[in-house]
Image (spheres, rainbow, N blue to C red):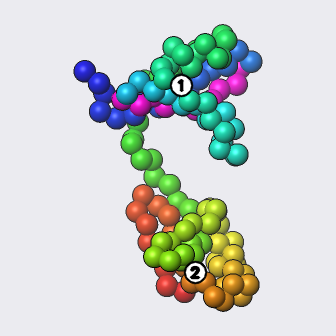
Amino acid sequence: MQPVFTRGFRLHLSDSQYLDGAEFPSGRVFVLDDPEYGFATVATSLEHLLEGYHGATVEWPAVPVEAHPAREAWRVEYRHADVWLPVRPTSDRQRAADDLTRRRQRHPEFEFRLVHVTTNYTVEES
């Protein structure tokens, strides 16, 4: 029987560093090699992934973790056609508000909004 949800794991490398990863119900896995730039390694199975990380071990969480942990950030979004497109989020509301002001001044032809990103999304009128 396949698990219903994706399972997170920690890949411990031989140099004592670790990478975050996930195993999907299909058996496919990915590991975030460089989260800052979005680089990841993807494999058809955990065994196949481990072939590329010699000496690495997998640590599974001891207890089930929350599917979507609480988080909070602020971001500016702009409207393109009928779609709102996000700009990089920040944890600082004032920084996001300043970014919103700058973008509105530089690009008056676009519609922008400030979004408070949490487990739920809230659009703030400004």
Q: In the rendered image of this protein, does residue 24 appear above or below residue 91?
A: above
Q: Residue furthest left?
A: 1
| Displayed quadrant of residue 14 | top right
Q: In the rendered image of this protein, does residue 26 appear above or below residue 77?
A: above
- Give the side of residue 42 with respect to residue 105, left or right: left
Name which of mark 2 and mark 1 comes first in the sequence. 1
Front in this rendered view, residue 32 or 28: 28
Front in this rendered view, residue 10 or 49: 49
Amino acid type, residue under disc 1 in the picture: Ala
User: Which residues, given as a range, are shown in magenta?
Assistant: 16-25
Residue drawn at (48%, 23%) of the image:
44
Residue 94 visible (yes or no): no
Which disc, if any, is residue 112? 2
Amino acid type, residue under disc 2 in the picture: Phe
Q: Is residue 30 magenta?
A: no
Write down the residue under mark 1.
43
**Element at label 1:** strand
The local crowd at label 2, few if under 14, some if 14 to 19, many if 20 or more residues have their Cα within 10 Å, is many
Residue drawn at (61%, 13%) of the image:
51
Q: Is residue 24 magenta?
A: yes
Residue drawn at (39%, 41%) of the image:
66
Q: In the rendered image of this protein, does residue 83 appear above or below residue 108?
A: above
Residue 15, percent from left and from top: 74, 18
Residue 11 visible (yes or no): yes
Magenta stretch: dominant SS? Answer: strand
- Point out the image quarter for the N terminus: top left
Distance CA(mark 2)–CA(mark 1)? 39 Å
Residue drawn at (50%, 55%) of the image:
71
**Element at label 2:** strand
The local crowd at label 1, few if under 14, some if 14 to 19, many if 20 or more residues have their Cα within 10 Å, is some
Whether pointer 2 and pointer 1 mark residues with C-beta atoms closer than 8 Å, the reply is no
Which disc, if any, is residue 68? none
